[in-house]
Amino acid sequence: MKEIAFDAFYQLYQKESLSVLDVREVEEFEPLHLEGAQNFPLSQLADTYDQLDKDQLHYVICKSGIRSARACQFLEEHGYKTINVQGGMTAFENRSEER
């Protein structure tokens, strides 16, 4: 599984149009998420993953990187291209607090 550090991901995110999949639950996603991210909760991923474009590279994020790693593994087993965002939204919140 490919992984990217949050800071490197965020630099790309700010410059390019990326497919960002947030696998946190809806109640975690709604109050805080990256603009343009799609919410595909890990608990429902087995039922919804076929809505994703198999030809696109997906950056997968959660709160810390654990659920997104599981999601990446699942998606890769089904032929999708993914990169796990290490540190997840916790890294985003920490980044925001530092400014």
Image (cartoon, rainbow, N blue to C red):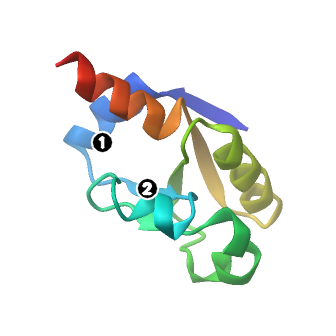
Quarter assignment of residue 19: bottom left
To which residue does mark 1 refer? 13
Report crowding for label 2: few under 14, some 14 to 19, many 20 or more residues within 10 A (C-alpha): many
SS at circle 1:
helix
Examine the rendered structure and indicate whether residue 61 appears above or below residue 51: above
Q: Which residue appears at 61% of the width and 32% of the height?
A: 3
The x, y position of residue 59, in whole percent, is 50, 49
Q: What's the residue at 76%, 49% (across, down)? A: 70
> In the visual, does 93 lie left or right of 49?
left
For residue 47, the mark is none
Labels in figure, total = 2
16 or 85: which is nearer to us? 85
Give percent across and percent down for residue 46: 76, 75
Q: Nearer the viewer, residue 90 or 39?
A: 90
Hey, which residue is sitting farthest left in the picture?
Answer: 99
Indicate left or right for 92 with 54 as reference. Answer: left
Residue wearing tag 2: 20
Picture quarter with the C terminus: top left
Residue sitting farthest toward the right: 77
Query: Which is nearer the N-term, disc 2 or disc 1?
Result: 1
Q: Alpha-carbon distance for marks 2 and 1?
A: 9 Å
Quadrant housing residue 86:
top right
Secondary structure state at the residue bearing disc 2: strand
Q: Position of residue 78 (x, y in %)?
A: 79, 67
Does the residue at mark 2 contact the one at mark 1 (Cβ under 8 Å)?
Answer: yes
* Residue type, numbered disc 1: Tyr
Looking at the picture, which amino acid does disc 2 mark? Val
Q: Quadrant of the N terminus?
A: top right
